[in-house]
Amino acid sequence: MGDMLKALSAPALVDAIWNNAFGWWRTMGTSPEAEFYDSPELTWLLTGLPSAFVNPVLRTRAEPDNTDALIERTLAYFESRDVTKFAWLIGPGTRPANLGVHLAHHGLSYSADPVGMAVDLLVLEEHPNPAGLTIEVVSDSRALEAWAIASILGTGLPETKVAGWFELFAALGFGLPLRCYLGTLDGEPVSTSQLFLGAGVAGIYVVATVPEARRLGVGTALTLAPLRDARAMGYRIGILHASPMGYGVYRRLGFRETCRMDNYQFQDG
């Protein structure tokens, strides 16, 4: 998990946001249910889930005269694996510098989402949990199955993908640096989150709430619970990658925009 980051300077936070996400993706790539490719030119993860965020090209180090051929080979392979949604990240150290031009030429669309945000855990805004909400750390297959169902329903992905989502994380076990949280409201699983410790910060992922339980504060509670745990472990900084839906919620908790994760996305259907 490395040394804990204490500096709140912008360059350090930007690096931490990117590197924590890279570590989260790489950890998922160790699951036998995922496919992870790493070469001097290219690094990518495929999960089989129809979401661009969990099918990313993470790092590109291509020579200018080989860029188009590399993109073509990669797109052809993704198509052969029936990957219909993926993101191609433009991160620190990307080569060539005009990679986005090449990606656009091959039909990918630019996106500046998600927004990288950070918060000082010592001044985290606290909110009481909604009445009837219980939050547990997922520590067995029973709870992970409920977590998988709630997170799939909360993100609007097909229910047919629950089994694959469950198997992806079941293969990783239940120990840190990756920990899942499940929120149950009046006995019903309704909300999820994940804590990933890496790059010296506490990263929050898979914050999702089923539609019928939204606007009750459960998403806020599931964001705060792992951050409190990270603070108790000595972490000073929490980070996350905000969608437009969650941006305002995270601002109210004290998160501040630090960077945007520029990427090009492909979505077929």
Image: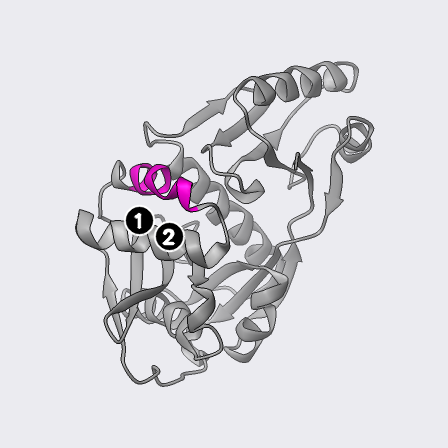
Q: Quadrant of the C terminus?
A: top right
Examine the rendered structure and indicate whether residue 86 appears above or below residue 1: above
Q: Residue at x 18, y 51 (%)?
A: 142
Q: Amino acid at mark 2?
A: Phe
Drawn side of residue 23 relative to residue 44, left or right: left
Q: Residue at x 65, y 15 (%)?
A: 73
Q: Which mark is on residue 244? A: none
Q: Residue at x 42, y 51 (%)?
A: 152
Please tell me whether residue 61 is drawn above or below residue 6 in the rendered image. above
| Mark carried by residue 196 | 2
Is residue 204 visible to us here?
A: no
Q: Which region is colored magenta?
A: 159-169
Q: Is residue 176 left or right of residue 124?
A: left
Q: Is 76 situated above or below 252? A: above
| Left or right placement of residue 75 versus residue 153 in this view | right
Q: Position of residue 221 (x, y in %)?
A: 38, 74
Q: Secondary structure at mark 1?
A: loop
Q: Residue 162, how many percent across, how many down?
A: 36, 44
Residue 242 seen by the camera:
yes
Tell me which residue sits at (49%, 41%) in the image: 22
The x and y percentages for residue 27 are: 37, 38
Residue 177: numbered disc:
1
Observer-nearest of 201 and 190: 190
Label 2 residue SS = strand
